Each structure stands twice: as structure tokens, then as C-alpha cells.
């Protein structure tokens, strides 16, 4: 609720590439996912829960349990932690640097994913991943076309608006 994530019974890969919506402490995986993930240890993997979600979407599916299964507690030493969108999105002179850095790591992670699984991913799944990872090298209009064509949308209206603003307006 705090993050304004859509409640879906099935997360699609193109959305999973664009944004992590999986909380690691609540994840359950099967042996097939473990077998695919266990030998992937790369510096471009941002978060283990995000990586697992991408693998699950590419080779299987992600289900949602619509009932609380744990009590989430935050403290001052949380590595990441949940923040409201407005608290995490700081309007400052550093905004370009922060947004650019966040996008850069997600593009690198997608490239790492494509490289890791290129031999076992079908072309119709591999192509969108490669397209996402190459977005920084494309013109603004081509980036916008890819967002629309492949539905690389982040969740919540405000995040989508920021995505479009980043593509349309030079920083």
C-alpha cells in the first residue's frame, strides 16, 4: 500500500525488469527457481529479490498471496526499507544524479540478466530484455517507443509520470 504497487496475481517480466516490487523477506521459491538462480553471482545484480522475480517471470510465474504472512518491522539499520514515494523522491539539485544512477543500475542488471540466460531464453523473451538494457544508447523518441511498446512501466501513476519526464525532458 505504501508504495502504491498494483496487486497482481501475475507479474510480467517487462514490469519486473523496470522496477522491483518483490520484498525479499516474503519470497517463497521452488527448486526450479533455485536451480536457475544458484549459480548467478554478479556485481550487476542489484537485489536478490529483484533478480529472483526476474528469473521467475522469465521462466515461470510470480504469484501473490493476498494476506499478510509476516509483520514487517523497520529500524534505523535497515539495508533498504520501505519509504513512501514522496519521502524517497527528493526534489533537489541531486535529482538528476540520483535518477540517472538508479536507471543505470537497472539497465546494467537487465544486460547482466540477458547475458546470464541468453542461451536458454526464447528470442521473444530475450529481445525485450536487450531492448531495455540498450535504452540509454537510444534517442529520446526510441526510448519512449520502447516504454510504450514493451510496457516497461513502473507501478503507480507518479512513477510512470517521472519515467516519461525523464525520457522527454533533457536533464
Image (cartoon, rainbow, N blue to C red):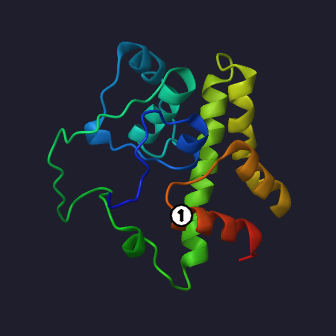
Residue 143 location, quadrant: bottom right
Which residue is denoted by mark 1 in the rendering?
157
Answer above or below: position of 155 versus 49: below
Tell me: residue 34, above or below residue 8. Answer: above
Q: Quadrant of residue 167?
A: bottom right
Query: In the image, is 31 to the left or to the right of 72?
Result: right
Q: In percent of the image, x 75 and y 42: which residue is there?
A: 131
Towards the viewer: 35 or 16: 16
Image quadrant where one finds the C terminus: bottom right
Q: Which residue is drawn at 16% across and 55% down?
A: 73
Give the residue at x 50% y 82%.
Answer: 91
- The residue sitting at 49% across, 36% down in the picture is 11
**In the structure shown, which secondary structural element does the residue marked by tag 1 occupy?**
helix
| Residue 154 picture location, percent across and down | 55, 54
Report whether 131 appears left or right of 48.
right
Location of the N terminus (image quadrant): bottom left
- Disc 1 crowd rating (10 Å Cα; few below 14, some 14-19, many 20+) is few
* Residue 139 seen in the figure: no
Whether residue 67 can be seen here: yes
Residue 119 in the image, given as x and y percentages of width and height: 68, 17
Residue 118 % position (x, y): 68, 23
Amino acid at each position: 500500500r505504501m508504495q502504491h504497487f498494483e496487486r497482481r496475481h501475475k507479474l510480467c517480466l517487462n514490469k519486473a525488469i523496470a522496477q522491483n516490487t518483490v520484498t525479499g523477506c516474503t519470497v517463497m521459491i521452488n527448486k526450479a527457481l533455485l536451480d536457475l538462480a544458484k549459480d548467478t553471482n554478479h556485481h550487476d545484480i542489484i537485489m536478490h529479490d529483484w533478480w529472483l522475480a526476474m528469473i521467475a517471470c522469465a521462466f515461470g510465474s510470480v504469484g501473490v498471496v493476498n494476506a499478510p504472512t509476516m509483520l514487517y518491522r523497520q529500524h534505523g539499520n535497515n539495508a533498504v526499507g520501505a519509504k513512501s514515494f514522496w519521502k524517497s523522491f527528493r526534489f533537489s539539485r541531486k535529482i538528476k544524479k540520483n535518477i540517472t544512477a538508479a536507471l543505470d543500475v537497472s539497465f546494467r542488471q537487465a544486460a547482466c540478466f540477458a547475458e546470464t540466460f541468453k542461451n536458454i531464453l526464447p528470442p521473444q523473451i530475450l529481445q525485450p530484455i536487450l531492448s531495455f538494457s540498450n535504452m540509454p544508447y537510444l534517442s529520446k523518441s526510441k526510448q519512449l517507443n520502447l516504454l510504450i511498446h514493451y510496457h516497461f512501466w513502473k507501478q503507480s501513476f507518479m512513477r510512470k509520470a517521472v519515467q516519461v519526464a525523464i525520457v522527454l525532458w533533457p536533464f
